[in-house]
Image (tube, grey):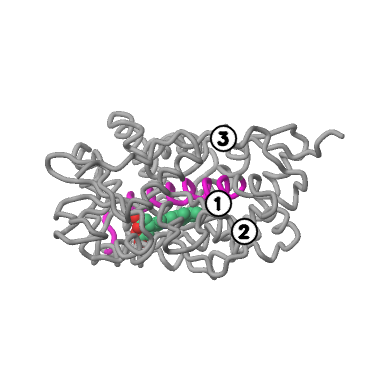
Amino acid sequence: MTLAPDPFRSATHGERHSAYTELNDRGPVHLVRQTRSRSIWLVTGHEEARACLIDPRLVKGGGSATIFGHRLDPGLLAATRTEMLSSDPPDHTRLRKLVSGAFTMRRIDQLAPRIQEIVDELLDALVDVESADLVAAFAYPLPMTVICELLGIPEERRGDFRTWSSLVIDPAVSGFETFAAAAEALVGFVRELIAIKRAQPADDLLSAVVAVRDGTDRLSEDELTSLVVLLLIAGHETTVNLLTNATYALLTHPGQLALLRSEPERLPAAVEEFLRFDGPLQVATQRVAGETFELGGVTIAAGDSVLVGLLAANRDTSHLPGADVLDITRTPTPHLAFGHGIHHCLGAPLARLEARIALGSLISHFPHLRLAEAAGDVPVDDAVLINGLTALHVATRPLPA
Ligand code: HEM
C-alpha cells in the first residue's frame, strides 16, 4: 500500500485544510507512515473517527508506544505519562474521577467574573496600540493565567513554563534531545510546586490533589506529577489556538463577524462552529491497536498506531454537507474537537467559557478590529498535534479617513 500525502507539515493554513480535503476525497483511513514493525494510520472520515474514539480495541498503553516513549528515561516516562489521557480503564476511570468534580459546568461557571476581569485587563492594554500580535497579547496570556490561578501557581513561577510546555507537546517537531530536556525541566518544576503545596496548602486545585495523594492510596506520586503536567499543558495549549483560530476565522469572514456583532446571543453556537471549522487539534493523541481489525476498507494490524484526525473529521462533507463553510447559524454543530468517549475533554466547560467571554469581549471592545497583515501570510504552527497560528497581527483603531 502506498503512503498518503502528509498533511501535517503544511506551510499555510489553506494548504493544511486542502491536504485534509484531498485525503477525505480518497477515503476515510490512510496509511501515513510505515516501519518494519508497525504502520501509522490517519483516520479522516467523521464516522470512522468517532468510532475509533469509543473503540476499546484502540488503547493508550501508558504512552510508551508514542514517539520517543521507548527512549525516554523510565522515571521520566512515569512522571509524565501516568495521567488519564495516556491511561486505559480501570486506571483511567480512577484518575479521571479524582479531578472531574473540579471541572463540572457549575464549578467552572463560578470562574466567569474572574475570567472577565482578566479579559478586560488584557484588552484594555490593546486600546492605544497601532497593531498587536493577538497570540502574545491575548490568546496566550488568558488561558495561561486562568489555569495557573485555578491550580494555584504563583505568578513568579510561571516564567519558563511556556517554553517547556510548547517543546513537550510536539516531540516530533522538537526532536528527542530537546523534548527530553524540556520534559525533565517541566517535571522538576511540577515537583517543586507540589513540595510548596505540601508545605503550605492553599484553597486551590493543586493543594486539593496533593491532599488526595497524601490522604489515601488512590494516587501515586508519579500519577500526581503527571496529572499536574497534563492539566497545565492541556489547560492552555489548546485554548490559545481556539481563540486565535476563531479570531482569524471571523476576520476573514466579514459577513459572519457582522452577524455575530449584531446578534451576540449567537456566541455559544458560534464557539461550537469555530471548534468544528478550525479546531485547535489536528489529531487526537495516539492510540495503538490491541488486536487486528477492519476499518474503512483497510486492515489495522495489532500493534499499529492510529491517529484520529479531528480537524479532517470535522470538515468531512460526506458527514456534514457544506462542512468546509464557516456558518455560525448551524444548530446543532456536530464536532469532535473535544474528542469523544471516555477521554472526552475534561476541560471543555472551561474552554467554552473562556472562549465565549474572550471572543464576545474582543469584538465588542474593538468595533474596527481587522487583520494587520495579508490573510495568506499568517504563519501556521509547524506541529503534528496542534492546529494553530504562531502569530496573528491585528489592528484595533479605525482606518484613517
Ligand atoms: C479549546 C480547548 C480544548 C480542546 C480543543 C481540547 C481538546 C481535547 C481533546 C480532543 C481531548 C481528547 C484527546 C484524545 O482522546 O486523545 C482532550 C482531553 C483532555 N483535556 Fe482538553 N481540550 C481543550 C481545553 C482543555 C482545558 C482548558 C483543560 C483543562 C484543564 C483540558 C483538559 C483535558 C484533560 C485533562 C483531558 C484528558 C481527559 C481524559 O483522558 O479522560 N482541556 N482535550
Q: Residues within 10 Å of mark 1 (few under 14, many from 20)?
A: some
Quadrant of the picture in which ligand 1 is shown: bottom left
Q: Main secondary structure of the magenta part?
A: helix
Q: Amino acid at mark 2?
A: Arg
- Which of the two discs, 3 and 1, labels the residue nearer the N terminus? 1
Q: Nearer the viewer, mark 2 or mark 1?
A: 2
Disc 2 residue lies near ligand 1 with CB under 8 A: no
- Residue 241 horizontal/vertical position (percent): 52, 46
Of all residues shown, which one is farthest toward the top? 177
Q: Residues within 10 Å of mark 3 (few under 14, many from 20)?
A: some
* Proximity of marks 3 and 1: CB atoms separated by less than 8 Å: no
The residue that disc 3 covers is 378
The residue range painted magenta reads 218-247
Q: Residue at 33% of width from left, 40% of height from top?
A: 5
- Quadrant where the N terminus sits is top left
How far apart marks 3 and 1 lie (CA) works out to 27 Å
Q: Amino acid at mark 3?
A: Val
- Residue 336 horizontal/vertical position (percent): 43, 60
Choose between 329 and 85: the one closer to the eye.
329
- Quadrant where the C terminus sits is top right
The residue that disc 1 covers is 146
Q: Amino acid at mark 1?
A: Val
Choose between 55 and 236: the one closer to the eye.
55
Depicted 162 relative to depicted 147: above or below:
above
Q: Residue at 51% of width from left, 54% of height from top?
A: 324
